[in-house]
Image: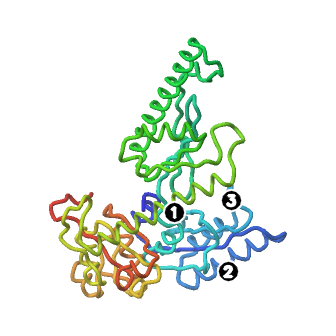
């Protein structure tokens, strides 16, 4: 899971106001309901100890309609501190339980659980003459990634069988092959540049297969084809969106399986031997303090996720007991949830976070980590 979206939250000290809000606008009195939600939320934050400026910033954000926001079945998460909403992000749908919280660490875990692994997908809409490339990234955002313009002649076969026409049709086949090779090269470059974890080809079957075959072997394994839609304007359908969603879900499933298998066996990427995995709050806190977490595994429903740990202003200031932080120089340690504190620390040190929803695959207690090799440099 890419945590760059959380960077503004990770890098700032608290205390933090966190709001998970249902902002569906499906009724005639939606504006009034929005105002009531905003007022109730900020009143709750104020009762929890939030300062007036931060409450005001949250209220203003909640009553402000965002451009492009859906009319119904919508949710938002807000992270605010010191009178500013630092991050205001959409949720895939209304939160299961809307709530507001105030504390030393932002309530990050429910946000990551809501958006899932969110793999980067390269979507390629192609035909015989070229392709349009788009990167489907965080929370379904789609960004233009360029286009390929191949040869446009000769591109169409004829039905005649005399010698000249057969020769012409061979040239058509060569044009198709050449254009497919150019598209495959562009896909390879773009996938590498954006770190694509899945590629989906959309277009006619022959063109899809030609391009698929010309991709490097390591990309063919993460490339899928959709028989719905195409490059021409107006050819998209809901079935294309379904296919893309299925591809991303399958990539997330495979990634979780890979990570949980590594956690169980202590094996690193490519079959390398890793020193160990960590489980249990004391071991995880120690690993986080030492910047040794490579991948943090979180089961949102695990028994240890809501356990109390102690934190300071720095993301690596964690302890099982408050007196430990005092010994390390933190004069005012504060209590926080273990999942949020460990996610903050892992993200700050450049680690990956993986949400594990299957209790059969999740670490005992819901929290675990694959540790970095001792000879690996620690990210700044």
Q: In which quarter of the image is residue 293?
A: bottom left
Residue closest to the eye, 207 or 356? 207
Q: In the image, which is nearer the foreground, mark 3 or mark 1?
A: 1
Which residue is tagged 2? Answer: 40
Q: How is the image coloured?
A: rainbow
What residue lies at 20% left-to-right and 67% top-to-bottom?
A: 274
In the orientation shown, which residue stands out farthest toward the right? 28
In the orientation shown, which residue stands out farthest toward the left? 375
What residue lies at 53% left-to-right and 62% top-to-bottom?
A: 87
Which residue is tagged 1? Answer: 249
Classify mark 2: helix, strand or loop.
helix
- In the rendered image, the quadrant that contains the N terminus is bottom left
Between the C-alphas of marks 1 and 2, the distance is 36 Å
Q: In the image, which is nearer the foreground, mark 3 or mark 2?
A: 3
200 lies above or below 108: above
- In the rendered image, the quadrant that contains the C terminus is bottom left
Q: Indicate which disc, 1 or 2, sits on the residue closer to the N terminus.
A: 2
206 lies above or below 356: above
Tell me, yes or no, whether the two marked residues, 1 and 2, touch with CB atoms within 8 Å: no
Q: Indicate which disc, 3 or 1, sits on the residue closer to the N terminus.
A: 3
Q: Position of residue 102 (x, y in %)?
A: 51, 79
Between the C-alphas of marks 3 and 1, the distance is 23 Å
Classify mark 3: helix, strand or loop.
loop
Which residue is tagged 3? Answer: 69
Q: Work out whether residue 3 can be spotted.
A: no
Q: Where is residue 351 in the image (x, y as percent from the top left)?
A: 33, 64
- Local packing at callout 2 (Cα closer than 10 Å; few below 14, some 14-19, many 20+) is some
Classify mark 1: helix, strand or loop.
helix
200 lies above or below 40: above
Between the C-alphas of marks 3 and 2, the distance is 21 Å
52 lies above or below 303: above
Q: In the image, which is nearer the foreground, mark 1 or mark 2?
A: 1
């Amino acid at each position: 899971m890419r945590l760059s979206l959380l960077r503004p939250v990770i890098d700032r000290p608290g205390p933090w106001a966190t709001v998970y809000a249902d902002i569906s606008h499906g009724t005639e009195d939606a504006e009034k309901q929005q105002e009531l939600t905003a007022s109730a939320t900020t009143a709750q934050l104020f009762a929890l100890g939030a300062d007036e400026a931060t409450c005001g910033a949250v209220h203003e954000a909640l009553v402000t309609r965002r451009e492009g926001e859906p009319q119904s079945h919508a949710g938002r998460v807000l992270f605010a501190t010191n009178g500013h909403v630092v991050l205001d992000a959409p949720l895939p749908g209304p939160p299961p339980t809307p709530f507001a919280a105030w504390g030393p660490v932002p309530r990050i875990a429910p946000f990551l659980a809501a958006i899932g692994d969110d793999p980067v997908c390269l979507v390629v809409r192609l035909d015989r003459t070229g392709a349009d490339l788009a990167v489907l990234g965080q929370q379904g955002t789609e960004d233009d990634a360029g286009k390929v313009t191949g040869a446009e002649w000769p591109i169409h076969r004829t039905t005649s069988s005399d010698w000249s026409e057969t020769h012409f049709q061979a040239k058509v086949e060569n044009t198709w092959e050449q254009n497919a090779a150019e598209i495959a090269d562009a896909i390879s470059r773009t996938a590498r540049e954006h770190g694509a974890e899945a590629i989906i080809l959309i277009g006619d079957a022959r063109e899809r297969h030609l391009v698929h075959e010309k991709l490097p072997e390591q990309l063919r394994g993460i490339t899928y084809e959709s028989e719905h839609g195409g490059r021409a304007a107006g050819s998209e359908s809901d079935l294309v969106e379904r296919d893309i969603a299925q591809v991303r879900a399958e990539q997330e499933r495979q990634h979780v399986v890979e990570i949980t298998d590594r956690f169980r066996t202590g094996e690193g990427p490519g079959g390398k031997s890793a020193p160990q995995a960590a489980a249990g709050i004391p071991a995880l806190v120690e690993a986080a303090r030492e910047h040794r977490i490579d991948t943090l595994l979180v089961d949102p429903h695990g028994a240890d996720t809501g356990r109390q740990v102690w934190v300071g202003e720095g993301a690596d200031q964690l302890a099982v007991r408050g007196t430990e932080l005092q010994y390390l120089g933190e004069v005012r340690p504060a209590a926080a949830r273990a999942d949020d504190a460990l996610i903050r620390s892992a993200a700050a040190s450049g680690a990956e976070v993986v949400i594990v929803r299957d209790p059969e695959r999740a670490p005992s207690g819901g929290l675990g980590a694959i540790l970095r090799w001792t000879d690996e440099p620690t990210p700044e």
